[in-house]
Every structure is written in structure tokens, then in C-alpha cells.
Amino acid sequence: MKIVFGPVSSRRFGLSLGVDLSPALKQCNFDCVYCELSPAKSIQAQNSVVSVEEILHEINVNLNKGLEFDVLTLTANGEPSLYPHLKELITSLKKLLNNKKILILSNGTAVLHRDKFEALLELDIVKFSLDSVISKTFYRIDRALKSIDLNLMIEKMAEFSRIFKGELVMEILVVAGLNDNEKEFKALDEALEKISPLRVDLSTIDRPPSYPVKAVSEQKLNELATFIKSVPVLIAQRNFSEKKIRLSKEELLKMLHLRPQSQMDIELKFDDETLKNFNELLAQGCIKILKLAGVKFYKVDKNY
Ligand code: SF4
């Protein structure tokens, strides 16, 4: 039973040391159609629980090896916030890792429980998933326990965001035929405006899913991203096509005015000529750099 894994390099959060809070089996209050773990009945609480001592011991063993990493990521085979000793664990981790960031990858339900809500406030980075804000689609994609109230969860995410001193990131995973349309994304944009995270990561299925569902194309992700106007979007697709785009300086400024572009977009999508134009605009001060939860975004400077 391996609790600690990595470090693995992630473009989204940097070099990450992972901690699995459900190492023996999948324990989740969702059973998402796209989950890379096998289907499993959704549950309210963990039945198989590792002790805080066991987790800290394994982390210490890895720290003593002198591993380099930027962020410690709390994750699970399932939903990490179902871990019953989350608050105690986070308190101990903060003492142990005083100069490292701590991140949790949650499906968002943590905000529905006061103790978990408060525990997450102590973290440096929190990532919540939100695949749909339309009830029918949400339950079809995430197959959540029926007791989970989607509207309340969105309200609580917004409340969390107002109080949280760290970096809040949201993630939307797009499934073909389910949430890949304008209606879904306009509704998501409204909810994101209320939640006001630093950025939203947009992705699709890239590993074998637990149910027979399909990914959308990179083009579709780009198209859907245009409906998100309230926050910067990071298209977190791993296998970008080789096709590069060419843009004049004027076109680049228009693009960056409409939507900030991430470092990943720039490296993967722009051809050499566009990169040259981009670097010149950057040197002239027309483009501003924003660092949002470890990812650089570029937008047109408001004074330009
Ligand atoms: S929330 Fe995560 S672990 Fe749980 S079913 Fe969905 S994808 Fe799988």
C-alpha cells in the first residue's frame, strides 16, 4: 500500500509529491463516467482509513531521501476530502513542510462539510472540479450521491473563495455529448463569475474511462473556452496537435485582449513568427504577465 508517489512534473502545479489518502481502494462520493479508476458505488465516508501517523511516516521517509518538489498534493483513489482526519493531517503537514506549498485536488464536495471547508482554508492551493452546473448533466457525468446539493455546493464554493487566502483553481472536464455545448458553458461561466477562482483548467478524457464515454477534440475545447469570459482558462490537454498558428502583432493583441493565454498555449500553439511577435510585444510592455496558481498567463496591459 503505497501512500506517497512521485515527484511528478505537472505543467499545472509544478513538481509535485503526491499523497494518496485512500491507497487501498477507490472511495468516492462520485462515480464519474470519465474516472480512470474502475466504477464503484458512491459512498458518504471512508471505510478503509490510513492513520495520520502512517501518512506522516511515509512522507518523512521520502523527505529524508532529499527529494526535490514544489508542492505536496493531497489526492486519493477517490475524493481526498473524505479522509476523516483531514484537519489533523493538514496541521501536521504545515509544521513538517514549512516552506512547501500544499495542494488538494477535490471534486468540490469538501465545501459542503464545515470541518472540511475549514481544513481546506489552511491550504496554499485548492482545486475543485465542476463539470456542470445544470443538475441533470451534473448527475449524469459525476454520478454523485443524490444527497449532494449542486446549487448549495456552488454557493459554498463562492463563500470559500471569498475567505480563502490561498490560490483557488477550478477544473471542468468535458465529455462528448454531455457538457460540450454552449448552454452548459454559458451556465458554467455564470457560476465561475460568482466563485471567482484564479483560473479554470479545461480538459477532456485522456485515459481509459470507467464508462463508455468519449473525449472531445482539441478544437472543441478551444471553442468551449471562448464561452468562459469571467476567468482565465488553461486548456490542460496533454496531446496537443502539432499544428501551430501564425498571428500578426495586431491579431495577437486582439487574442490576448479577448482571453489571456497560458504559457502552455504559447509554447504549444504559436509558430516561430508568432513567438517573435509575442516576445517583441512583451519587451515593449504591451503584454502583462499574471501568475495564477503556478501557471503564467499573458494578457494585454490595461494601460496599453
Ligand atoms: S471524483 Fe475523481 S475519483 Fe471520484 S469518481 Fe470522479 S474522477 Fe473518480
Image (cartoon, rainbow, N blue to C red):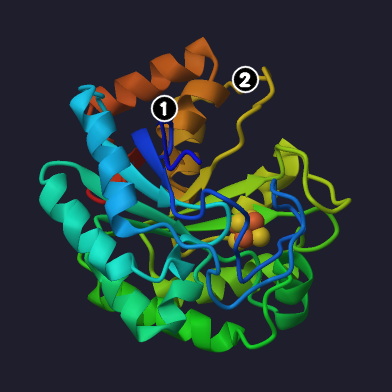
Residue type indicated by callout 2: Lys
Q: Quadrant of residue 140?
A: bottom right
Q: Which mark is residue 191?
A: none
Rounded to the nearest whole Å, what is the CA distance between mark 1 and mark 2? Answer: 24 Å
Pointer 2 residue Cβ closer than 8 Å to ligand 1: no
Q: Earlier in the sequence, mark 1 or mark 2?
A: 1
Circles 1 and 2: CB atoms closer than 8 Å: no
- State which quadrant residue 245 falls in: top right
Looking at the rendered structure, the kind of residue marked 1 is Ser
Q: Looking at this view, name the residue that lies furthest to the top.
A: 272
**Rendering coords of residue 95 (x, y %):** 11, 53
Task: Looking at the picture, tell me which residue is in the foreground, 246 or 294.
Answer: 294
Which of the two discs, 1 and 2, sits closer to the camera?
Answer: 1
Q: How many marks?
A: 2
Residue 246 in view here: yes
Whether residue 227 is visible to the viewer of this picture, yes or no, is no
Q: Which residue: 19% across, 27% down?
A: 64
Q: Residue at x 65, y 68 (%)?
A: 30
Mark 1 crowdedness (10 Å alpha carbons): few <14, some 14-19, many ≥20: few
User: According to the image, label 1 marks what residue?
Assistant: 9
Q: Secondary structure at mark 1?
A: strand
Counting other residues with Cα less than 10 Å from the Cα at mark 2, is it few (<14), some (14-19), or many (20 or more)?
A: some
Most foreground residue, 153 or 49:
49
Residue 84 in the image: state x and y as whole percent.
Answer: 40, 71
Near-viewer residue (183 or 127): 127
Residue 244: which numbered mark, if any?
2
Residue 153 in the figure: left or right of residue 180: left
